[in-house]
Amino acid sequence: MPRHFLIMGPPQAGKGTQAQLLAERFSLLHLATGNLLREISQEHSERGRKVSDFLARGEYVPDDLVTNLVIERMNAHDVLLDGYPRTVAQAETLEDLGIRVDRVLVLNVPEADLLQRAAERLTCPQCGAIFSLTIDPPKVPWICDVCGNGLAQRLDDAPATVQHRLKVYVKRSEPVVQWYLSRGLVEFVDGRGSIADVQSQLVAAVAVFYVAARPQESPDSVALGVGKDRGN
Ligand code: AMP
């Protein structure tokens, strides 16, 4: 049975960076709905325009659209769900589809820190790499270390949009945390430390699922599904 881990946290909690590292560490398929939606928002289509509008306003896109994106990418591999489910309706859909979530990792970061991180974040529109003006600056100002493209601030990192995204998270996603808490599946992780500190807490939470199982898995199944996306 494939395992399904879910990582959650308010905007700027470091979810995308941590998810990418965690997915690579355990060879999990990294399903980051924010990244998928940002790709779609670039499409010159009705769907692209619609998604782009939701993202720019800091609103969640409709449940059915994002559910389809996730379901069509699920396969037999262990998965790290990054940003889905984000509403109780999405969590219920996943359960109705018989997809069991094994562990929910919730990053906790105080609101003041989240707002400061948003003001400092730079992303690469080309490859998705993330930098921070103070904590993790690019070697050349405003140039991506990975692909050399110019860096930009994400449209939804504008202060007013971040405040709004936080409100949306509290209203729509904290009930998802409660929903999984009532099922005994949540592990809270302090998201205030360095990237390495936070990652080691996450690794410890996921490793318990592999300690006994790893030696029995074939090398092929472990090598597939390495996540390459970089979200927030
Ligand atoms: P993220 O990169 O995870 O912060 O997601 C960026 C934005 O994508 C969110 O603020 C939402 O507008 C949208 N989004 C991502 N995942 C979902 C989801 N599961 N349901 C609805 N909207 C989503």
Image (tube, rainbow, N blue to C red):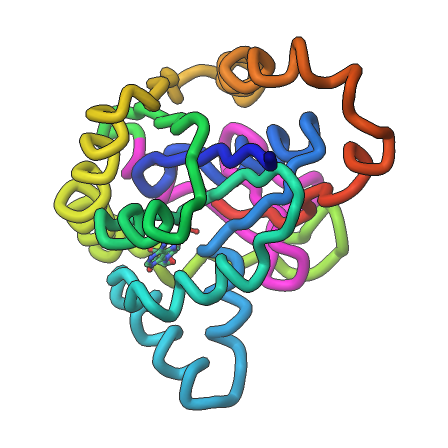
Q: Is 115 in the magenta?
A: yes
Q: Which of 155 and 79 is in front in this view?
A: 79
Q: Position of residue 226 (x, y in %)?
A: 72, 42
In the rendered view, does 115 fall on the left or right side of 45? left
Left-right relation of 206 to 50: right
**Is residue 38 visible from the viewing direction of this image?**
yes
Q: Is residue 45 magenta?
A: no
Q: Where is residue 116 in the image (x, y as percent from the top left)?
A: 32, 35
Instruction: Name the residue rendered at 37%, 39% in the picture.
Output: 12
- Residue 134 in the image: above or below residue 208: below
The image shows residue 98 at horizontal and vertical percentages of: 41, 46
**In this picture, is 156 found above or below 224?**
below
Write the start and end of the magenta stretch as one range.
Answer: 114-142
Q: Residue at x 78, y 36 (%)?
A: 221
Q: Position of residue 78 (x, y in %)?
A: 62, 37
Q: In the image, is residue 66 above or below residue 77?
A: below
Task: Please indicate whether residue 207 sits to the left or right of residue 88 in the image.
Answer: right
